[in-house]
Image: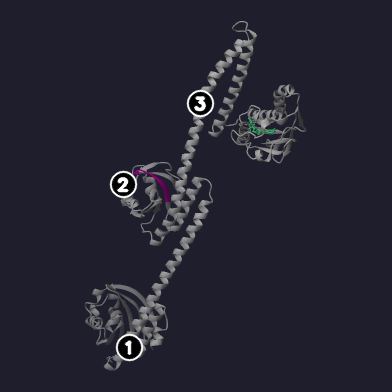
Amino acid sequence: MALDVAGSLEPREVIARILERGIHVVQADRATLSSLSDDHVVVEATHGRAGELTWVGQRYSLDYFAGQPLVQKAIETRQPTFGGGLASERAAPEFRQAIRDVRHVAVIPLVHGGKAIGMLVLSRYEDRPFTNDDLAALTLLGAISGLALRNARLYEEGEAARKRADQTAARLRAAVEAAEDVASQVQLDQVLGRLLERAVASVGADGASVARLEGTDMVLESTTSGAAVGTRWPIAPKVLAGVKNGKSVELTAAEYTGAPEGLESIVQPFRRFLVAPLAIGGETIGLLAMGRRKDEPFDPAAVQSLQQLSTLGALLLRNARLIAQAQDAERAKSEFMSIAVHELRAPLTVTGGYLAMALDGGFGELPEPLKAVLQTAQRKTEEAKALADELLTVARLEGRALKPSMGLFLVTDVVQEALVRGRPRAELIKGTLKADIADDIEVQADRTLVGKILDNLINNALIYSDHPPKVRVTARRDGDQVAITIVDDGIGISPLDQGRIFGRFARGTDRRVLDKPGTGLGLYLSRGLAEQMGGSLQLESSRPGKGSTFALRLPVAAA
Ligand code: ADP
């Protein structure tokens, strides 16, 4: 019997066996089993003689036994107790009918560790009392059943613990995956958005936000709804207190009613909140808040997995802050450059005007030596103005203030115009400059900007040569782009320089380059402008002593 009852670890299986054994051992008509704990009793199941088993699962307070002295005695003495029936009028209404038919009962406490953890009630409908002959068997049944029931419960708890551990492991795995996923995003707002998505999924929330802390205020960096990003709010006192301890804080909606005006639309849909601090190096730099529509507390495993994500969130937020600072600095620098260059350019224009007037005889005939000096001054002023213009374009490009005005035009036209502008310089150094363009290709770009880029490339091709240069401009279709190439037979570019000439203020390292005037801005600007128009600029090939080929690609006009 002992082996039979204890032969399973499944609580229901164990209960069913205890009931069945109980009926058999003393020839009872009905057996009912209840579990006992400190303050309540659960009637688990009842078994009739014909073999019918009913799961009850009803829970009652322990006072339920107050009117049943037989039961009380059995629990107190931890011994089987016999009697002539239970007090039906004191029983719960649903049991009254069944109890009324009972003539004799045996109440067997199921004992474990000196305590009754359950109770088996055996009933007989016929007038055959339980006797001392039944006592030994029932005492044994009580002890073994107590043990079996206890083991089954322990096993059940163990299973539940294992399941929880599995869940925690799965959550940790999810956190690692989330970290990888989130870190693979390049755009900061996308990174934060992804973090929130992951956090919402892993703690079972309905919405979330991430905010950075500034004193006792928070500034929303990202929200799942996209609302209120960039707004600033005072932090609820309870959150502030919890965050100081580096702990997550759970709040009900009522505790959030301190939410300031304007934040209601974000707070209102939710009944419960979980707010985790984002800390780095002991400093709390932000908050990760989760909202739940239902008024159900977050379970501890969820709180733990939020902890993992908040570490990641803290790192991202710090990076966000650094990037924002860098962007601010970059913007401030571009603005400063625009203003400075503007201020420089104005007096240069005035000076240039007076010099031109003087050289034109506007102030009377000039002595030759003075004329020569003023001509040099005029050339230098023009150079300074050109530099100022270049710097201004750099500032506008970098400050994203430069918007190309796109139009449709023929490549041949814009190239011919550039050749006309470049020819005087080519002739001065006895070089040749020609175009070799087979068919008419229409492009979509900013005509003035394309002209500037071509001027730059053609000038370089003419300048960087130690003999009268031969420069050729060609154009061909290349997919949905046109590739305009500027080919020269000049000094070429060393492999080392090839990697840096598109940089800002970058000039070649060759002596023959440094002997010529230049700012190192031409290629940097030209590439930036090409990209602004949806095109590109590349050094296609170059060999020292043999020459270079640059290729400007622009989008072909849609047919
Ligand atoms: P800059 O001409 O004012 O130096 P650029 O940005 O136009 O500035 O050019 C950067 C550098 O690239 C030059 O200093 C030179 O070393 C190299 N370079 C550009 N074009 C050529 C060319 N056609 N042949 C040889 N070197 C070139």
Q: Is residue 515 left or right of residue 203?
A: right
Range shown magenta? 208-216
Give how far apart the Cα atoms at labels 3 and 2 are.
49 Å
CA–CA distance between discs 1 and 2?
63 Å
Q: Which mark is residue 340?
A: 3
Give the overall secondary structure of the magenta segment: strand
In the orientation shown, which residue stands out farthest toward the front? 511
- Amino acid at dot 1: Leu
- Ligand 1, seen in the image, is in the quarter at top right
Look at the image and say whether residue 546 sits in the magenta stretch: no
Which quarter of the rendering shows the C terminus?
Answer: top right
Q: CA distance from mark 1 to mark 3?
A: 100 Å
Q: Is residue 211 shown in magenta?
A: yes
In the rendered image, which residue does mark 1 sit on?
140
Residue 102 visible to an observer of this rendering: no
**Percent position (x, y) of residue 439?**
76, 33
Depicted 178 relative to depicted 445: above or below: below
Q: Quadrant of residue 364?
A: top right
Residue 116 position, x and y percent, is: 29, 80
Q: Secondary structure at mark 3?
A: helix
Q: Nearer the viewer, residue 86 or 279?
A: 279
Q: Tell me, yes or no, whether the two marked residues, 3 and 2, touch with CB atoms within 8 Å.
A: no
Q: Which mark is residue 258?
A: 2
Q: Is residue 132 above or below residue 460?
A: below
